[in-house]
């Protein structure tokens, strides 16, 4: 599973206080994970953040932008029919899971990381007739 340091910014180690904060947030998310899927948890986290910190003061602008980003990401995950797991996407294209992940790492196919599940998700809209839209 990815560490908090790699989730936030690859190559930047979190300070001890930041690690504790991430640990507490992850603990809170695990407590409600059985009643909401990751996309909905991301949306609800953004709502909770904006309710807790409603004023966009100069020192909160970045934090508010991050919270808005959570909501946008959640909308993207739900748009155009949802997403496929790496296994499902590989099966759709008739290739191995390793091959689809390699294409993702090379930037040849669109996907995002689901850190909570330690998985990669592929938007459904890019698949048609067992091919990736735009591929020969």
Image (cartoon, rainbow, N blue to C red):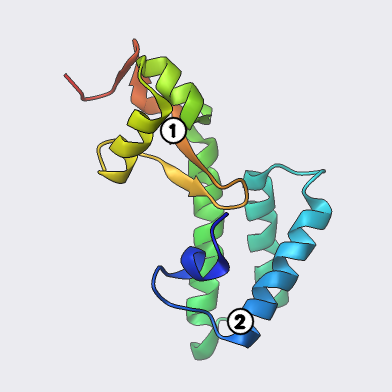
Q: Nearer the viewer, residue 33 or 91?
A: 91
CA gap, disc 2 to disc 1?
Answer: 32 Å
With respect to residue 67, does 34 lie above or below?
A: above
55 vs 35, nearest the viewer: 35
Residue at the top extreme of this rendering = 129
Depth check: give the residue in front, 91 or 122: 91
Q: In the rendered structure, which disc, 2 or 1, sits on the residue that comes first in sequence?
A: 2
Is residue 86 positioned above or below 36 on the image? above
Residue 89 location, x and y as percent? 43, 24
Residue at 63% in and 62% down? 46
Please tell me whether mark 2 sits on a helix, a strand or a loop.
helix
Residue closer to the observer: 62 or 5: 5
Is residue 48 left or right of 117 when viewed as pictured? right
Q: Position of residue 104 (x, y in %)?
A: 33, 40
Q: Quadrant of residue 70?
A: bottom right
**Residue 51 is at least partly visible in this image:** no
- State the mark number for residue 123: 1
Q: Is residue 23 visible?
A: yes
Q: At which x and y percent is residue 135?
A: 20, 23
Give me the residue at 44% from left, 45% from top.
112
Q: Contact, CB < 8 Å: mark 2 with mark 1?
A: no
Location of the N terminus (image quadrant):
bottom right
Q: Which residue is mark 2?
A: 18
Q: Residue at x 71, y 63 (%)?
A: 26
Q: Is residue 75 above or below residue 7?
A: above
Residue 48 as seen in the image, left or right of residue 13: right
Q: Residue at x 74, y 58 (%)?
A: 29
Which class describes the residues within 10 Å of circle 1: few (<14), some (14-19), or many (20+)?
Answer: many
Mark 2 Cα shell of 10 Å, populated few (<14), some (14-19), many (≥20): few
Residue 126, given in percent of the width and then of the height, sits at: 35, 27
Disc 1 secondary structure class: strand
């Amino acid at each position: 599973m990815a560490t908090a340091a790699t989730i936030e910014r690859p190559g930047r180690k979190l300070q001890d206080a930041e690690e504790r904060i991430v640990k507490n947030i992850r603990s809170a998310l695990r407590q409600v994970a059985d009643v909401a899927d990751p996309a909905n948890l991301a949306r609800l986290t953004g709502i909770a953040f904006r309710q807790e910190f409603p004023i966009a003061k100069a020192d909160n602008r970045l934090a508010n932008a991050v919270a808005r980003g959570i909501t946008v990401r959640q909308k993207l995950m739900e748009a155009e029919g949802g997403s496929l797991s790496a296994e499902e996407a590989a099966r759709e294209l008739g290739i191995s899971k390793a091959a689809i992940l390699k294409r993702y790492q090379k930037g040849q196919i669109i996907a995002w990381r689901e850190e909570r599940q330690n998985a990669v998700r592929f938007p459904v809209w890019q698949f048609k007739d067992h091919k990736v839209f735009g591929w020969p």
